[in-house]
Amino acid sequence: MKYGCIHTHTLFCDGNSDVETNCRAAYEKGLNCLGFSSHAPIRKKIEKTGWVIKEELLNDFLSEGDLGQYIDEVNAAKLRWEGKLKVFLGLEADFISGITGPSDSDFAKMGLDYIIGSVHFIIPPKGNPFTVDSPLAELERGIREGFDGDPQAMVDFYYDALAALVGQKGFDVLGHPDLLKKHNANNRFFDEDSAQYKKRCEEIAALAEKNKVTVEVNTGGMNRKYIKSPYPSGNFLKSFREHNVPAVINADAHKPEDLDGYYAEAVAAMLAAGYTEMVLFEGKKNGLPVWTKVKL
Ligand SMILES: [Zn+2]
Ligand SMILES: [Zn+2]
């Protein structure tokens, strides 16, 4: 099959299954490759980090800067599945201004095949930090307490962070670029069709082109039944296309069944945005990611 998934979570963070079970499922589904992208640990303690890497690994990381068991297990799976399924070792690293980012020196020495750079966290001017993909009530509280009830201020914070991430480099795939739309059905918080919003998306796409970033078309929100379209939305994806930003389809799977979930919808979204091809990850060569182009 021409598809892969390099955005996968296991029991090492908030996924529900282990490395081997995911490999078997990917193989049975006929995927070309499977990349593990556990949520990266964060050195500085911030509130609400329940879904990040499990405690023993965090302790390893804090004491030795390593992620021993995770790295060992994925590397062992690479060998076990050689010739049948390409397995890659990655991380999904948060960007939080002044706190952590994919280009932190910690990650460089882990021998990773790739890093997905994502923005989840909002550290508002006041109140507690929250993630844009929190349950709805938490997001509402974050906007109320952190931004005086002004969703646009949160949108601005999010896109400022995303622009800083894309400007920083140090990662290989830009994760779910409009994650903040998770609870925005019927434009509950902000108008995705407004000129102002489109302009922000356009700026991100231009920056991604300039810095040679690959974006993902992420069906995770569909797999988990939160939203009815992939990240990024149609207009945003179109901006990426217009800027010739390559796109990889990922399931952001938290369980093996979802490894190719809603890929037909992702392909349809890409075609609608004007893409004629997607890219598949082939690993790293001389420190640079290698992608093959595949017709949609
Ligand atoms: Zn994520
Ligand atoms: Zn993820």
Image (cartoon, helix red, strand yellow):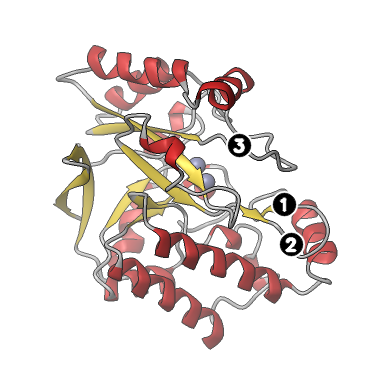
Q: Is residue 225 left or right of residue 229?
A: right
Q: Are the two marked residues, 2 and 1, in contact with CB atoms closer than 8 angstroms?
A: yes
- Give the amino acid type for the residue marked by disc 1 in the picture: Phe
Mark 2 surroundings within 10 Å by alpha-carbon count, few (fewer than 14), some (14 through 19), many (20 or more)? some
Query: Residue 252: where, in percent of width, then height?
Result: 46, 41
- Say if residue 194 shows up in the picture: no
Using the image, determine if residue 196 lies above or below residue 130.
below
Query: Is the N terminus in the top left, top right, bottom left or bottom right quadrant?
Result: top left
According to the picture, the residue beneath numbered tag 3 turns out to be: 43
Tell me the residue at 60%/34% (across/down): 52
Q: Nearer the viewer, residue 59 or 238?
A: 59
> In the visual, does 252 lie left or right of 276?
right
x and y percentages locating residue 207 in the rendered image: 36, 71
Q: Nearer the viewer, mark 1 or mark 3?
A: 3
Q: Amino acid at mark 3?
A: Arg
Report the quarter where the C terminus lies. bottom left
Between disc 2 and disc 1, the foreground one is 2
Give the secondary structure at mark 2. Answer: loop
Q: Which residue does the numbered mark 2 point to in the structure image?
A: 124
Q: Quadrant of residue 295?
A: bottom left
Q: Going from the N terminus, do you reach mark 3 or mark 2 first?
A: 3
Q: Which residue is mark 1?
A: 130
